[in-house]
Image (tube, rainbow, N blue to C red):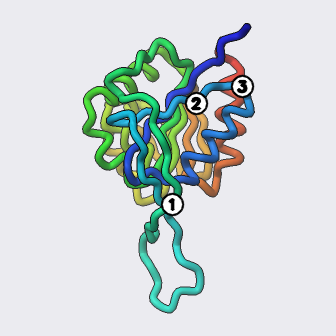
Amino acid sequence: MTVPRKILMPIGDGTEVMDTLYPFFRLQEEGFEVVVAGPEARLYHGVMHEVPPDSSIPWDITREQPAYHVRASVAFRDVRPEDYVAALFSGGRAPEYLRYDVYLLALTRHFFAAGKPVAMLCHGVEIPAAAGCLVGRKGTTVPKCALDITQFGGEYVDQDVVVDGNLVSARGWHQNAPFLREFCKLLRTVS
């Protein structure tokens, strides 16, 4: 019997459900076990971000509203990174505070240092940036997070999906299909 290869997916309250749930199910279709981790092993509140269409008062930023809940089965402090072949950092508001978690930062550094496939989209960039992993790297994100790449020594590329070695990045959930297509190509190269 083959043991499923594991992918780590860190989340927290305010995780964007389209950034999180689409990859969660898509990667399982590829035969991977997606392990959702959080500051604690518990249920987290997901959110949905959108710019409301045809609004009489336009929004300069995305509007946030409650969405599905997502369960983390393990706390960051209990994750053994050597058991995982890759990591995926989804977006939403969660990375704004998760980037201060010392356990998560150490996990993030492991994936980059080991050259394992890493995927990040939207605000997910804030975690690898805070971990110091974007120095000399190219990536993309939503334009309002471009500074999370450039101020941490990386190069922001203004396109939907960017592949830089073992790192795949995308602006946000609208790019889920091409984003996951590129990430799956990388994952097929891991044993």
Above or below: residue 50 compared with residue 175: below
Q: Amino acid at mark 3?
A: Gly
Quarter of the figure that contains the N terminus = top right
> Based on the displayed image, in which of its 4 quarters is residue 149 positioned?
top left
The crowding category of the residue bearing disc 3, from other C-alpha atoms within 10 Å (few below 14, some 14 to 19, many at least 20), is: few
Q: Amino acid at mark 2?
A: Val
Q: Give the mark nearer the N terminus: 1 vs 2.
A: 2
Residue extending farthest to the bottom is 56
Q: Give the labeled residue for mark 1.
A: 67
Residue 31's disc is 3
Q: Give the labeled residue for mark 2.
A: 34
Q: Amino acid at mark 1?
A: Ala
Describe residue 158's horizontal placement relative to residue 190 as left or right: left
Residue 82, image x and y in percent? 47, 12
Residue 172, image x and y in percent? 55, 53
Gap in angstroms between the C-alphas marked 3 and 2: 9 Å
Gap in angstroms between the C-alphas marked 1 and 3: 27 Å
Residue 80, image x and y in percent? 42, 16
Secondary structure, mark 2, is: strand
The crowding category of the residue bearing disc 2, from other C-alpha atoms within 10 Å (few below 14, some 14 to 19, many at least 20), is: many
Describe residue 100's horizontal placement relative to residue 169 as left or right: left
Describe residue 81's horizontal placement relative to residue 158 as left or right: left
